[in-house]
Amino acid sequence: MSEYAVSMEHVTKTFSGVKALKDVQLHVKPGEVMALLGENGAGKSTMMKILSGIYTRDTGEVEIFGKKVGKTMNAKQAQELGVAIIHQELKLCQHLSVADNMFLGRELVKKGKMDKKEMYHQAKVQLEKLGVTELDPDTIVGTLSIGRQQMVEIAKALLINAKILIMDEPSSALSNAEITEMFRIVRELRGAGTAIIYISHRLEELHHIVDRVTIMRDGMYIADGNFKDFTMDQIIANMVGREITEQFPRSKVPRGKKILEVKNLNAGKLVRNVDFDVYEGEVLGFAGLMGAGRTETMRAIFGVDSVESGEIIMDGRILSIKSPNDAICQGIVLVPEDRKKEGLCTNLSIRENIALPNLDKICRAGGMVDQGEEKKIVEKGTSSLAVKMANADTAADSLSGGNQQKVVVAKWLARDSRVIIFDEPTRGIDVAAKTEIYQIINQLKKNGIGVIVVSSELPEIMGISDRLLVMCNGRITGELNPYLTGEEEIMTCATKFGSNEA
């Protein structure tokens, strides 16, 4: 019997004449965690879709536990061989229960009827094996946090006796506590002999669970080996094809005048008496745990959520913001946490996405779009941010995460915005694209635009901020100098629950 759970050799895949995979290899042993690393577009997802039967390969050999599988292997056949994939965007039916989701498509039947009782029992047993004892299988999935939904996906995979588990960006939307719990489960699965392929752009988390790494670039295999034998700089250099000398490039710009003041802002349960200022020439960072109120504060300033009381002042003038349109017209814009759902119309082109919030600038009398003006703002935005695209009529959903983020920024730059808020700006994008986003933030700062950044990644928020505010339980609990502070001090402020009682 082969020593490998997965062996892929000389695999190629072409889409519409473009080679997505070029003679790629991957080997994973039972009972190990293999990190599959590479930039967006490196071919990682294509490789995993071939392994899980979603795509067919053009050439190459694939073996699962020593058994050769044909090119025409489908998803059901891959599942029967023990392969399960947990996608970054979870594939759960939000209106169904946990148990119903776990047995979807293979429901248990007794005497011609669905055996709900046995499905509930088996789901409960599987969840308990994972240590998720508090989760009731009758709970509707849509009411659960992303972290709990992730556990449902893992339990579902194990219920089909998965021996090879593919995890695609599993931690991208989880809190620190949920990530810790997921790492515990990954270690248990590894100990039980499960082969785990772990895809992540959050390189700092790899040392917690990873045994070996395989690195891809531009659809090609680049290197593999024991994780402990690589430095992080070597991993990054292999991923991007060059050395990135500074992970968080931060430009020092003299602080200018005050642009924005937020005074005693209250909105819902998670924005309580929030005060802060934003100045030209600085990046104001917001740190805190999940549910601290950071995103809710930004949504209130941008007019998504109703403000109960408080003032938002721009250049000394009190603003009236009742909707996002009010905020946009007065120079405040938001690059949201979920760029696909809230920042882009993914079924529209790049051109249409940039033009849409700028129709008041590019429409002639009578409502007709001035195509010349539209072309100007689209070309200016895409060239200044170096959006990688075939042309401006390319669909937004075909772009990598980093390039989608650039399109969101481009549409706001066309409005000469005064304050740009970034909520989790690098979530789910690769290390090279992250550096490009940081450079964009630096350029905005140099141009005198007020920049606010919300990030759950402490190294990132410390690395790009000039001033740092920490929130807990809806309030600001600390103002820190990121040049001088450490993660421990940030976490102390982020857990000041007792001092935040109204």
Image (tube, grey):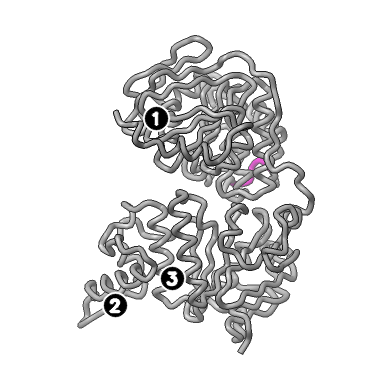
Which amino acid, by three-letter code, is at mark 3? Ala
On the question of residue 51 being in view, the answer is yes
Q: Which residue is mark 2?
A: 108
Q: CA distance from mark 3 to mark 2?
A: 16 Å
Residue 354: x and y, percent?
59, 34
Q: Secondary structure at mark 1?
A: strand
Q: Which residues are magenta?
A: 391-395
Where the N terminus falls, by quadrant?
bottom right
The residue at the point 54 percent across, 67 percent down is: 166
Residue behind mark 3 = 157
Dot 1 crowding, Cα within 10 Å, few <14, some 14–19, many 20+: many
Q: Position of residue 308 (x, y in %)?
A: 32, 23
The answer to which of 366 and 195 lies nearer the viewer is 195
- Three-letter amino acid code at disc 1? Arg
Q: Position of residue 223 (x, y in %)?
A: 74, 65
Q: Which residue is mark 1?
A: 475
